[in-house]
Image (spheres, coloured by chain):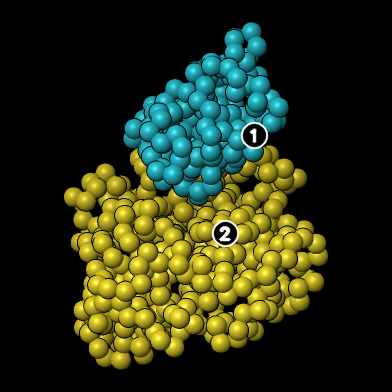
Chain colours: A cyan, B yellow
Amino acid sequence: MTVLHAGVAQGPVLLLDEPLSFWGAFDPRSGTIIDIHHPQKGQSLKGKILMMLESRGSGSAPGGLAEAIRLGTAPAGIILVQPDINLAIGAAVAETLYGKACPVLAVTTPEFQELSKSAYLHISHDGRVGPSLDDA
Amino acid sequence: MADSRAHQLALQLVEQAARIMGAPRLIPISFAHVDACFYTGQSHVDFVKFLLEHGAKLSVPAWTNNSVASPDDGGLRPERSDPEMVRGAHELMELYAKLGCKPTWTCAPYQLAGGPKFGDHIAVGESNAVAFYNSAVGARTNKYGDYLDVACAITGLAPFAGLHTDEGRMADIHFSCASIPDAWKRQDIFFHLLGHVVGRKAGRRIPAISGVPKETSTDQLKALCAASAASGGVELLHVVGVTPEAPTLNTVFRIGETYEVTTDHLKAAHRELSAFNDGPLDAVALGTPHFSLSEFAELVKLLNGRKVKTTTYISTSRGIREMLIAKGWLKDLQDAGVTIPVDVCTYYLPKIQGLKGRVMTNAAKWAYYAPGMLGVEVCFGSLKECVESAVFGAVWRDPDLWSNP
């Protein structure tokens, strides 16, 4: 487990079947997936612990996440397997500007599989994750 | 001010990226091309305002990417088309100029004098510029997303990892064009279609491409870089005998897969980028990435004093427009009915007037993005086909071109 951007969060798990780009495929104004090619189009990310193996690359992704955090439509936290700089930077900038945290973590594939079985997850500031406060 | 709050934030972001990339240290850069000046939301405005209010100073020359709007042409994307976005775009342009960026507003900064040179470490965000600077110029940059690009420009530092290192620049997939007839390789569409094929197959790997003519031009490299960055995410490619780091295949490629590019691959790419091949046209859109002076020279020759019947947009930078004025071509083109937007591109929202329905382009990158972004149908063709079609007001196919059986 690697903390890409630290923070405390909890929420229901949303496991994505495919990677998502935070720019073009996601609308920060509504907090929903808008990419017509994404199998979970229309799903809201707001308040969720978002789990996806990787993020789809776009240089504008940091702004998409930061804007969602500003508007309160962002996921509560993000758990990836592939470390992603864009989401870490977007979360870091939003925290500086708006004082709101959205932790971003990278975990191993087995850890990801185990965590994705949970309906609800807690993330602690040092990056521990689990279904209850004790685990996190 | 190295101890300002803005500088601290910038350094924090660069160090955070370095940690994630596993970079052992930061290295000085000499140039940045900033993409965070492209408005995607209020947070972009808040970020640069925060920097300005907390003492930010640029450490290196920083040029700006395209904007959503152009102060020179308020009618192009009028405020009513998306008030938040257009107003935000104008504000963002003012703020980045205030930060000290050179207001180039172009996705093709490599067409302007005074940019980075071979071996320079730089920080660039725009995908086609990342690929062109790495590949054609031999400068070194990773693809730095929004905010991190500005942070690199303020600190004058970048993480020493990836494409900044010698070993990170070796190719891991080889594309051979040996079986493609030479006549095909002399056409401009070859490089757009090859780029599309290479990007699709390579994804984010580093391609080495062999069997491409030595006399390949910078405009052709621009097309190759832009198309492969769009369809795949290529940040560096080597063209053997053409780009500066690849005098021979062995210099840049030792182990990995070799992929034989065939005429069928190129024809399939052409079909993929073209939703239709004949009939009426609503518009022609050229200049993605921004049209160069040499491309305008070719266009003026092809147009040969005729007027266009179809709405025709050719995007370029204000820098190249200055050169068009000096040559007397701007007025000629305007008299021919051509619109030449600066500072922006045409494939994203809010929609530019007239760009609807059936649109023809010579740019693989435009053909790749516009159907999803604008909901248009795209016909891909050579520059000559686009010009003739604009003049006739309907799709014209070149009987001498290999893509037309």
What kind of element bears circle 1? Answer: loop
Q: Is residue A118 left or right of A32 when viewed as pictured?
A: right
Q: Residue at x 40, y 86 (%)?
A: B399
Residue sitting at the far front: B405
Please state the chain letter of the residue tagged with numbered disc 2 in the rendered image. B
Few, some or many residues within 10 Å of mark 1 (<14, 14–19, 20+): many
What kind of element bears circle 2? Answer: helix
Residue sitting at the far top: A134
Amino acid type of the residue tagged 2 in the rendering? Arg
Instruction: Read off the residue under disc 2.
Output: B200
Instruction: Read off the residue under disc 1.
Output: A81
Q: Residue at x 41, y 46 (%)?
A: A24
Could you say which is closer to the camera, residue B350 or residue B34? B350
Amino acid type of the residue tagged 1 in the rendering? Val
Q: Is residue B42 left or right of B11 when viewed as pictured?
A: left
Q: Residue at x 52, y 21 (%)?
A: A13
Please state the chain letter of the residue tagged with numbered disc 1 in the rendered image. A
* Residue B164's disc number: none
Q: Is residue B180 left or right of A39 when viewed as pictured?
A: right
Give coordinates of residue B111: x percent, y percent: 48, 74
